[in-house]
Amino acid sequence: MTPDLFDIAVVGGGAVGCSVAYHAAKRGASVALFEADRIASGASGAAAGMLNAQAESHSPGPMLDLMLESRKMHETFSGELREHSGLDPEYIRAGTLRVATDEAFAGKLESTYEWQRREGLSAEWLDADDTRELGPGLSPATLAGLYFPEEGQINSPRLVKALALAAANMGAEILECASVSEFLMDGDRLAGLRSVLGDFHAGAVVLAGGAASGSLASKLGVEIPVFPVKGEILSVEARHPTPISANIWSDACYLVPKRDGRIVIGATEETGVYDRRPTLGGVARLSGAAARLVPEVSGLPFSSAWGGLRPGTPDGMPILGAADEWGNLFIATGHYRNGVLLAPITGEIISALALGEEPKMDVSPFSPGRLREKAKR
Ligand SMILES: Cc1cc2nc3c(=O)[nH]c(=O)nc-3n(C[C@H](O)[C@H](O)[C@H](O)COP(=O)(O)OP(=O)(O)OC[C@H]3O[C@@H](n4cnc5c(N)ncnc54)[C@H](O)[C@@H]3O)c2cc1C
């Protein structure tokens, strides 16, 4: 029976919203999740699914700590979700190999290697021969490589569906085609929300609308400076054995070998574009870059191309935590290139906050207010 008052209402059925719903349901809370379209129809359904905590990091700090913690959670998360949903998110830990084909990029990789080794992280610097041994299909132009053995990858759409199913199996209401249009207010608190399915009351509201989070928050007078960063991506059908096993990533494209036999090749970046359809130019750029990196892929059958809108923020970090303006509004968005990686830790932290519990990590560096403070300076 649907309760009159949910503990938590979550807006958005991507990796972030579904992870919040799952973690909240696991904590015993009553949860309703509202998705305007279908579960995983946003950026999370478009993602390559790489779990790159180290390969995506530029320096030590809270962002690196958050990414490392979430990567660690992924190691057991897939098994846990398979158990609760019957769906396997296909986690693989085969590492990420960054590849340089010119001196300038090799120099950048070398400085990444140096600071990460100083931080005690596992990373291996490889000469051309060792790089090609790890990625046998790599072009003879390969100069050097930086291998991160602890990185992994996952099937992102399956992860999101598994999260939603597991949450539903724990009692959460997962509502699709349920666009949220308004919020119900009661003094300085939110009483719930209005969707096309009617009014729903909740003790706390979590905003996880991806690139649309800013316009949703503006209905509440809350400024969330999230903007779309369009990414185009495609896939080819690999032969067996595939020419690669790790995620391979140059300065121009990446290749991710999937368990179902596809190689996913991504991704373009265009800020401020709302049309997520792939373009001929995007497909041409990606396929050219992939063929230069692993020549064999140009002979593989094309499978499909698609696009998605990453939720970008001015400082490249997610926005996590309570909104100052409302006592019971929580923001979980702005995960930009790393929302799939960060889904487990985000769900864990935001569900704890929304239920009045202490989160397992300090989220103050990611607070919604920080961007306003930075803008003032
Ligand atoms: C091409 C590409 C490749 C990527 N590769 C990776 C990768 O390898 N690894 C990684 O970690 N990340 C990757 N990302 C980034 C990642 O996809 C995002 O950071 C992540 O999906 C964001 O998740 P989200 O749940 O916040 O947003 P979304 O998945 O976009 O979900 C938000 C949901 O909110 C819904 N919504 C919006 N408004 C409303 C409303 N009013 N009412 C109800 N629902 C609403 C939307 O329909 C949508 O389903 C990639 C992204 C792209 C585009």
Image (cartoon, helix red, strand yellow):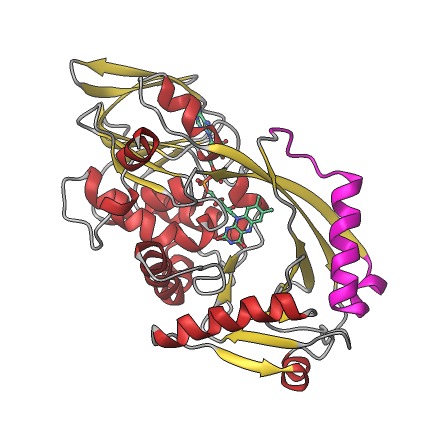
Q: Is residue 335 left or right of residue 264?
A: left
Q: Is residue 285 magenta?
A: yes
Chain part drawn in magenta: 274-301
Vertical arrangement, residue 274 with respect to residue 151, above or below: above
Q: How many marks?
A: 0
- Residue 332 at what x, y percent from top left? 34, 39
Q: Residue at x 55, y 66 (%)?
A: 108
Q: Quadrant of the N terminus?
A: top left
Pick the front one: 69 or 78: 69
Describe residue 327's horizontal placement relative to residue 178 as left or right: left
User: In this rendering, is residue 244 above or below 126?
Assistant: above
Image-quadrant location for residue 309: top right
Q: Quadrant of the image for the C terminus?
A: top left
Between residue 93 and residue 103, name the one nearer to us: 103
Q: Is residue 297 left or right of residue 351?
A: right
Percent x, y for residue 43?
A: 54, 41
- Residue at 48% in and 47% down: 161
